[in-house]
Image (cartoon, helix red, strand yellow):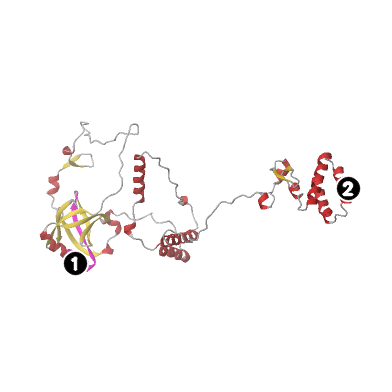
Amino acid sequence: MRSIWNGAISFGLVSIPIKLVNATENHSISFRQIHLADGGRIRYRKVCELDEEEVSGGEIGKAYEDADGTMIPITDEDLAQLPLPTAKTIEIVAFVPADRIDPLQMDAAYYLSANGVPAAKPYTLLREALKRSNRVAVAKYALRGRERLGMLRVVDDVIAMHGLLWPDEIRAPQDAAPDGDITVRDAELDLADALMDTLGEVDMDSLHDDYREAVEELVAAKAAGETVLPAEPEDTGDGKVIDLIAALENSVRAARKSRDVEDAGDGDGDSGMADVHPIKKTSSKTSGKPARTTEAERTTGTAKKTTHRTPTGKTVTRSGSSTAKKSAPKSTGAKKSTSTTKKSAGSAGSRTTAKKSATKKRTSSSSGGTTAKKTAPSRKRTSA
């Protein structure tokens, strides 16, 4: 790894030559600015305000802008001559327990590498001293034109340094907490504990940047000329007030289900969730139940018509009214009488004719017993 700074660790009267290298790297995808009209790159040029000419990097220096706008030039030689002991030294000022360092102060991370063979022994001495004491070293150092605060700790067999923000650079968390006196019930805390236990721990090495992978797939698809379909947005609740107890209970169930699926591999076992299928509509002929017709359909005559065959082989088209469907008893004699009644009602269309037909049928079928009794109510309903 390429070093970005060379100096020494000042450990009392012990000096340890070291090289500073970056411990982290940025994997985020960077984009270029383009002109939407023709796709040309948009570039920034450094132009002098006085002569409006573009200036190269070798012609650019530093200056401090005074309150009245006056520019005070500051050269690298001026900065190098400052009486600053940390200009080339990481000066350890104290050793403290690790929990004394507020994570809010954490900044960039670096590895400290021993610079040369003579540095190996004092480097190892400091590393083992930090391990045995279970403490971290607080140090001051200068980098990129300013003095900074750092924390030294041991990572495997290497001394790492975390840049720290100065205490006065940390903002107070005022106005960030919820307003008012809010109480949390024990039942809610118990569910929160259950959710935490269910989620459990995670292997930090298994975590990865899903957004970066999605952007890489998007770029690859566009480069290949493929059409990229938009993903369905997840339901985030839109900031609505929810039932906290119900949300916690659902979260615990979902977490347990997720863990069960992970433990089962492909999740072929019973996951506790039933499959949902659309309900198939069945016809009245299959189910044996007549379809219902609303009162509005009976009144306006817009009920759906059904066509089926009678036992005699005749095709009959009927409206969806309940009267037509009730006049279809199971016995053969009843079906014949229904057909006779329909014919008489269709030819005359009057109530008198229907009554006479009903009277004749009752007289002629007096020896029929059960068949006549079943037919008479059916004819009355039809004629009515």
Left or right position of 85 against 40: left
Callout 2 environment at 10 Å: few (<14), some (14 to 19), or many (20+)?
few
Amino acid type at image mark 2: Lys
In magenta stretch: residue 139: yes
Q: Which residues are magenta?
A: 126-144
Instruction: Judge by depth and name the residue closer to the eye, 183 or 133.
Output: 133
Where's residue 17, x and y in %? 13, 57
Nearer the observer: mark 1 or 2; the answer is 2
In magenta stretch: residue 181: no
Give SS at disc 1. Answer: helix
Residue drawn at (33%, 57%) of the image: 206
Residue beneath disc 2: 360
Where's residue 188, x and y in %? 46, 63
Amino acid type at image mark 1: Ala
Residue beneath disc 1: 129
Residue projecting furthest to the bottom: 132
Residue drawn at (31%, 58%) of the image: 205
Mark 1–mark 2 contact, CB under 8 Å?
no
Left or right position of 184 against 131: right
Instruction: Judge by depth and name the residue closer to the eye, 259 or 358.
Output: 358
Give SS at disc 2. Answer: helix
